């Protein structure tokens, strides 16, 4: 009987220690084991990042025909060995576009 009483007291003491946290004792917040649950938003799940379902996609589309000025640049020498003799290989061409947006009245 006395052993059961000691077990009950030990369990009650463990419960009292477990219920202490930084809001109801002098313990620092870093000693809290479990953080309180966050409040749920109205309407359920939080929206994800990026475009939302049902919204129209906005994007800028540029065409080469819209350009005011076009500059063609060709290599004078090999970028790896600086050799001046360049061999044109039909499958090794590279096209790169760069746009500069300027306000036009």
Image (cartoon, rainbow, N blue to C red):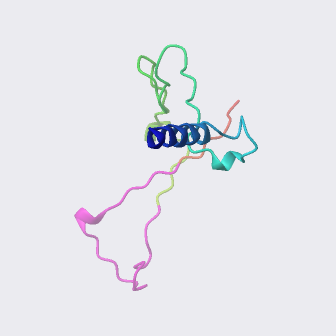
Q: Which percent across, then down, holds residue 27?
A: 72, 46
Q: Which residues are magenta?
A: 73-98
Residue 66 versus residue 95 in the image, above or below: above
Q: Dividing the image into 4 quarters, which one contains the N terminus? A: top left
Q: Is residue 101 left or right of residue 91?
A: right
Which residue is more in the foreground, 14 or 25?
14
Label tally:
0
Q: Which residue is depicted at the point 31% across and 62% down? A: 93
Q: Which residue is depicted at the point 68% across and 35% down? A: 103
Q: Which percent across, then down, holds residue 10?
A: 53, 43
State yes or no: residue 74 in magenta.
Answer: yes
User: Looking at the rendering, which quadrant does residue 81 occupy?
Assistant: bottom left
Q: Which residue is depicted at the point 51% across and 55% down? A: 71
Q: Is residue 42 left or right of residue 29?
A: left
Query: Which residue lies most toward the front here?
Result: 1
Q: Is residue 65 left or right of residue 31?
A: left
Q: Which percent across, then down, holds residue 79?
A: 42, 78
Q: Is residue 84 left or right of residue 5?
A: left
Which residue is more in the foreground, 56 or 86?
56
- Dominant secondary structure (helix, strand or loop) of the stretch shown in magenta: loop
State yes or no: residue 84 in magenta.
Answer: yes
Query: Which residue lies most toward the top here?
Result: 43
Which residue is more in the foreground, 45 or 62?
45
Q: Which residue is depicted at the point 47% across and 63% down? A: 73
Q: Dividing the image into 4 quarters, which one contains the C terminus? A: top right
Q: Which percent across, then down, holds residue 54?
A: 42, 16
């Amino acid at each position: 009987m006395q052993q059961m009483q000691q077990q009950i007291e030990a369990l009650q003491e463990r419960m009292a220690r477990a219920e202490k946290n930084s809001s109801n004792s002098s313990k620092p917040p870093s000693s809290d084991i479990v953080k309180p649950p966050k409040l749920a938003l109205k309407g359920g799940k939080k929206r994800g990042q990026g475009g939302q379902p049902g919204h129209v996609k906005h994007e800028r589309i540029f065409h080469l025909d819209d350009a005011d000025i076009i500059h063609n640049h060709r290599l004078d020498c090999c970028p790896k060995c600086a050799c001046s003799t360049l061999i044109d290989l039909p499958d090794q061409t590279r096209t790169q576009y760069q746009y500069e947006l300027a306000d036009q009245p």
